Amino acid sequence: MTKAERESFLADLHVGVVSIEDPGRGPLTAPIWYAYEPGGEVTMLIGPRSRKAKLLEKATRASLVAQTETAPYKYVSVEGPVSISPKPPEGATKAMAIRYLGPEMGARYAAGGDGESLWVTLTPERWLTTDYGKRG
C-alpha cells in the first residue's frame, strides 16, 4: 500500500488488535477500539484496572493491527512508542463509542459508563501493510 492508502485504511472503522510486551510470556494480544487520523497518532481507551493497562504502564512500545474480514484481504500493522494519560480528553469516550456503536447506542454507552478510562497514544514508527487485492 502507498502511504496514503495505509493511512486511509487505518483511519477506517476496524476493531484493532493491540499487542503489548508481557515479560516471561508471549505478548498480550487483544481486540481494542481505536481511532486514527492520517498523519497522526493512534488513540485507544482502556480500563485502568485491565491487564492491558498494567502492561502498558511498564511497556514503552506496542503494536496494533487492523484488517478486513473478507477477501481480498488487507491489513495494516503499526508499531511504536506509547504514552498513557490518566484521563481521556473531553468528549473522547463519547466520540469513540459513537465511532463503534453509532450515534444512539454510542451516546448511551458513554453516558452509562463509569467514566474511568485511560487514554493511550501510540505513535506509528514502523508500518507493515498488505493488500492482496493488488496482487496479480
Image: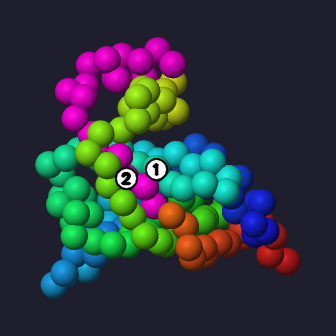
- Residue lying at the far bottom of the rendered structure: 24
Tell whether 13 sits left or right of 86: right
Asked if the stretch drawn in magenta spans residue 95, the answer is: no
How did the renderer colour the structure? rainbow
Amino acid type indicated by mark 2: Val
Q: How many marks can you see? A: 2
Question: Which residue is the site of mark 2?
Answer: 120
Q: Which mark is residue 14?
A: none
Tell me the SS state at disc 1: strand
Q: Residue 43 carries which label?
A: 1
Q: Quadrant of residue 23?
A: bottom left
- Quarter the C terminus occupies: bottom right
Q: Is residue 113 visible in this depiction of the protein?
A: yes
Tell me the SS state at disc 2: strand
Q: Residue at x 31, y 17 (%)?
A: 111
Amino acid type indicated by mark 1: Thr
**Gap between marks 1 and 2, in whole Å?**
6 Å
Q: Is residue 101 visible in this depiction of the protein?
A: no
Above or below, comparing residue 39 to residue 89 in the picture? below
10 Å crowding of disc 2: few (<14), some (14-19), many (20+): many
Point out residue 99 in the picture as x, y percentages from the top left corner: 52, 33
Q: Residue at x 35, y 23 (%)?
A: 110
Q: Are marks 1 and 2 in contact (CB under 8 Å)?
A: yes
Point out residue 117 in the picture as x, y percentages from the top left corner: 27, 40
Q: Which residue is drawn at 20% across and 27% down?
A: 114
Toward the viewer: 55 or 19? 55
Q: Quadrant of residue 118?
A: top left
- Quarter the N terminus occupies: bottom right
10 Å crowding of disc 1: few (<14), some (14-19), many (20+): many
- Residue lying at the far right of the rendered structure: 136
Q: Which residue is drawn at 40% across and 35% down?
A: 89
Tell whether 8 sits left or right of 89: right
